[in-house]
Image (cartoon, helix red, strand yellow):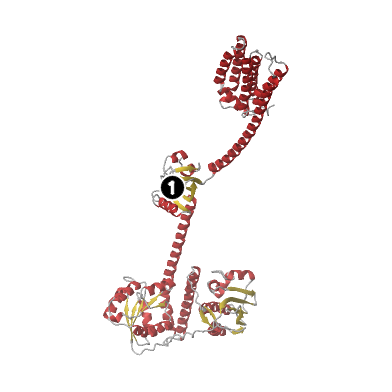
Amino acid sequence: MRALLDDGLDELAAKTYQGFPQRMATTAIVAALASNLLPWQSCALFLLAQSISEGICLLASRRQFLGFKASPRRRLIQLSTVGFGCISWMTLGALLWSSGTAAGAVTGMTLWLSVIFFAQTHAYQSPLGFVVGGALPGAGILIWCLAFAPNPLNMPKLPVFGLMIMSLAFASDAVVRTLAARRKFEDAQARLRTSELQYRMLADNITDVIALNDLDGVRRYLSPSIERAMGYSVEELFATHNYTYLHPDDATWVPRELAAMVERGGEMTLQYRIVHKTGRPVWVETNFGLVQAGDATQIISVSRQIDARKALETELVEARQRAEDAAAAKSDFLANMTHELRTPLNAIVGFSGILRRSPRLEAQDAHHAALIHDASTTLLELVNSVLDFSRLEAGAVEVEARPFDPHTPVRAIAELMTEQARARGLTLTVETRGEIAPLLGDASRIRQVLLNFVSNAIKFTSEGGVTLTLIQQEVDNDCGRMRVEVADTGIGVTPQQIELLFERFTQADASVSRQYGGTGLGLAICKRTVELMGGTIGATSVPGQGSTFWFELVLPRTDALEDETEAEPETLDLEEPLRLLVVEDVAVNRELIAALLRPFDVVIETAENGEQALAKVQDQAFDLVLMDVQMPVMDGLTATRAIRALNLPRLKGLPIIAMTANVLPDQVQKCLDAGMDDHLGKPIEPARLLAVLSEWPGRAHEVA
């Protein structure tokens, strides 16, 4: 029963309530007209019955008219009044049919047909309403008329009631079709509501903002998520132009970019700021595209807040800046540290080297001078190791690719270390395997690694010997694999200790540094150097029996070998006296240069800063200038630029050589960029100093 009393009865009730005045007016008119054919008492009774039924119907349908759903009981009452009203109308038609007049019969038939088709027109609201309010009363009247109704005019019943039956059949078929169409319509509405609900749910809950605007900036659609993004409601924004809340810094270029997109077509993505209702700027990223709406082109956009991304980008930029600042501070510290260490070391190493060779010293004093020189050399090696490691970590080391014979660095290190091995009672042998062919690589870096390997092997071996093995294998037609092994019969290390040996400031155990010395940086430098050249490095060892350290490099083959570099001179061969200007603020360093060059035909003038140097080169002629960099009053770089700017012909080819403890690659480049011709690092190596003095004056004459 509940299934029959569906929601359609509420719709029928609402329409019934709405049509109450018209029905009552129609009822009164019909009653008045019928009184001309029927006794007035019958017509008055019809009017009274209809008034009572309509009154009850009015009360039963008011709740539905107000938009509320009714209970099944109320729906049944309302349906009963509809059925009673239809029966009342059909009864009036039967009385007119039986009135014995032709007008009455015609009026009765017309009234029956009107009730049936009136019920049909409202059947789309409720099929039960049609059955109760039209089909059942109509069928009942047909049965009554055919079986029991008087026929005073003796009218043929077949055509008359056949027409009634056909009308009822047509009305029922129309009701079936109407109900089928209504079901389709309701299904379509249900699907539309479901789809709209889904889209509404997406639009209400999606964090991105979807917008549709005309090309002139008039808003057509905004998703509700705009309120979370901007603080303004959709209604507030629809009352404004599209570009109203752009950040002032973006208010000009964003519309210009959109206009350009409309001009060229396609789509684009922009990042810009909008002003929130609270006044704070909000970063958004928007994807813009063009859509066609009939003949009009519109801009569709999808925007999302990117404040978090922008904050992260800012943090990354700041973190990068902090890292760069830290790296710069580290570089500055390293530069200052190496400069401050190398400056006094220059005097210590230089004078101790001169002193130990002095023939005037007693044997004991010469021994002490030699110890000072060895200690200062060791300290210099430590400074160089720290510097090399820092440069490797900072990626400031570049690998050269030049043709070399793999035999050369191996034999050079063996010759260099043979005397040291012999002094400890050890043998140092060299072995080769395979066909050794020229390769393309950095021979100086390979020598550096080999020197560390062999030096360590000799240091940690008390008896037996060290074997240096060179192995070369063909990788393909273009490359060869170079493997070098340094095996010793020393103390050895455990497998656990091997894993730590190539880390910085790490040795096998604490006692090693106390017994053998060292910083623990050598192998770390070797590892990074080999890896920089694209190779691998490793070690094997048995405690008490010895160790083997090795590295492998895959390098391109080559046919052309460069000439070996000539050995640096130990004397100075000059055709005429050399006039030298030494610009150095530290007196002991000026004295050292004078002492180193005293045996040679060199006339030395000195200056304590760049300002003095600038004055002297204008007053006197020099063959070469040794220029320190860090000096008071005027530094060496400024002085060099000033000298190069002088318009004196004799200064055109004057060689200016940087003589400084600033030895980092970027520091050397700054010297060259300032106009210096070469670089001589501190501590000064006598052979390197003589080589510079031999080379540059002659080259300067060629340039001039």
Does residue 664 show up? no
Residue sitting at the far bottom: 575
Residue sitting at the far right: 147
- In the image, residue 483 sits, relative to residue 23, either above or below, namely below
Residue sitting at the far left: 619
Q: Quadrant of the C terminus?
A: bottom left
Q: Residue at x 61, y 82 (%)?
A: 465
Rendered location of residue 357, percent (x, y): 44, 85
- Crowding around mark 1 (Cα neighbors within 10 Å: few <14, some 14 to 19, many 20+) is some
- Along the line of sight, which residue is nearer the eye, 645 or 615? 645
Q: Which residue is mark 1?
A: 215
Rendered location of residue 417, percent (x, y): 54, 83
Rendering quarter of residue 1: top right
- Tell me: 126 left or right of 686: right
- Along the line of sight, which residue is nearer the eye, 615 or 262? 262
Question: Which amino acid lies under the numbered mark 1 shown in the image of this protein?
Answer: Leu
- In the image, residue 51 sits, relative to residue 650, either above or below, namely above
- Tell me: 422 left or right of 324: right
- Along the line of sight, which residue is nearer the eye, 545 or 576? 576
